[in-house]
Amino acid sequence: MSNIAIKVTSLGKAYRLYKKQSDKILDSLGINRLLFYKKNYYQELWALKDINLIVEKGERVGIIGRNGAGKSTLLKIIAGNITPSEGKIIVNGRVDALMELGTGFHPEFTGRENIKAALGLYGFTYREIKRLEEEIIDFAELDEFIDYPIKTYSAGMYARLAFSVSTMLKPDILIIDEILGAGDAYFAGKCIDRMKRLTEDSGATVLFVSHDVSSVQRLCERAIFIEKGKVVDDGETLPVIKKYTALVRELENNRLRLKSLGLQKKDALVINTEYGKNNLLFHFIENGWNDIKCKYPVSKITLLIDDKYTEALNIGEPMDNDNTQKAYIITSAGYTEWSNPEKIDGSVFRSVMDCDGIYKHAPFIFKFPEFIERFDKVKLRVEYYDNTNGMLVLEIYNGKSYIKIGEITYKSSNQLQEMEFDITTILKEFGNLSEDNSINEIENEDIRPNQVITKGDVYGDMRELIERVQIF
């Protein structure tokens, strides 16, 4: 018999975002596809893309990542709550999922009545229910509240009862999605010990999602780090947690830098109408701004400041058109010329092609914080798959019109290629970069108040400097 509990192959989940409710209704009836077979009347938001996983029976796997990374979407697909848009999933065994507070129990029933209803639903006899009922109440430690309606319970009390019932059912696969975060540290410790015993005694598989990485490390021998709908790392728990915390630390570092410069996050990330200042709008067009006759695959656009990686736009990957990100493409239906995501030789792309966009262009945006003025050199690196003959032109919007940056010539080499464009001079003409300010100011030994330091292992805004930690 196979030892595989869960097998996920090339899994993806896309949500369609409609501008008008009428488009959603017509699409559900299939009418839009008949009338506008070439039109993009919706935008695709990929919550998951190209997920490949194998989880063996008896494994305890922690799934970590930021909010919106796709963790809950993956678990809902495994639990059977939603269907994937692409790929395959095989689940061997009965799944019990604790994913959201407020589901599974009737709010008007007492805790005791909900226990009986849950056990009865799974086919336990009256005698078995009476025996297990007391074990559940004892583990949840809700004796004095068990005969009160569930609607009077706090989030922590609900989590205690839900976990106690689910683990008593001894499922083949137990999914815990952040519900234990509502409980206290004492009960969380009891839950981790019980989940360990489940895997050891009955061979159950546990998928555990939590932002508390110490709990993940304590329970799980394997961790999966998901970011923007893709698996970033999968392996032993501690190295994966280190990679995740490094990302969190980098984001916190950026926040502190903005704060030290007197900026809020929205100042750096929210689009203004003033594109040449905080946001740079680029686009691809075919030479001469003609109708696009070929299909030009583009895979990645990277921003380099002083020849160091700063931000990357992975085109075709989940949420590449999410305007809350630091870099994204604009895929407005009927206006732009970005195709839906596609695969070439196993890699994900979008193509600049004729999608009936009235402006005949494929635009994208990089969002800039104000402190970019301290850098000396800014480049844009474009990676593309060269499988056609033709020329794409890269242009930037200066607040009044588009001006040409350079050209990408496709020669049908059928290989992944890249080109770099130096946009420093253009940005200085916009007033984004100052000739007098340099990144060298940040590296100067004379530290100004609230200056952000990012050298070596020192980071933060320097309001307090921890020089030594001693454990007694």
Image (cartoon, grey):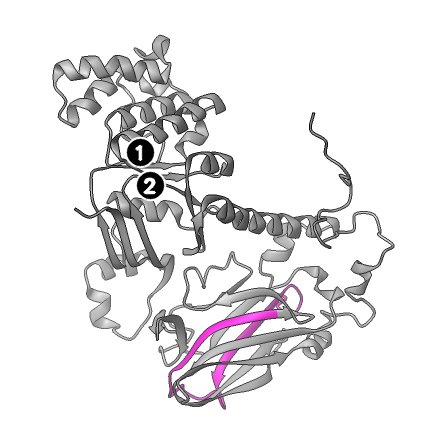
Measure how far apart labels 2 and 1 are at the Cα level.
7 Å
Looking at marks 2 and 1 on the same chain, the residue that comes earlier in the sequence is marked by 2
Residue 59 numbered mark, or none: 2
Q: Is residue 228 left or right of residue 84?
A: right
Quadrant of the image occupied by residue 176: top left
Residue shown at 37%/22% (left/top)? Answer: 160
Res 110 visible? no
Q: Where residue 38 sits: x, y (%)?
A: 29, 75
Residue 199: which numbered mark, if any? Answer: 1
Give x and y (percent) for residue 50: 35, 61
Q: Nearer the viewer, residue 414 or 254?
A: 414
Drawn side of residue 109 relative to residue 235, left or right:
left
Amino acid type indicated by mark 1? Thr
Please say if the residues under marks 2 and 1 sit with CB atoms less than 8 Å apart.
yes
Between 370 and 304, the one lying in front of the other is 304
State whether residue 79 appears in this view.
yes
- Magenta stretch contains residue 351: no
Q: x, y (%) of residue 33? A: 23, 68
Q: Badge 1: how crowded within 10 Å, few (<14), some, or many (20+)?
A: many
Residue at image position (32%, 12%) is: 146
- Where 271 sits versus 262, above or below? below
Magenta span contains residue 285:
yes
Identify the element where label 2 is drawn.
loop
Find the magenta span and give its range: 274-303
Say few, some or many: other residues with alpha carbon within 10 Å of mark 2 (under 14 / 14 to 19 / 20 or more): many
Q: Which residue is at a point 41% across and 55% down the rendered structure image? A: 231
What kind of residue is marked 2? Answer: Glu
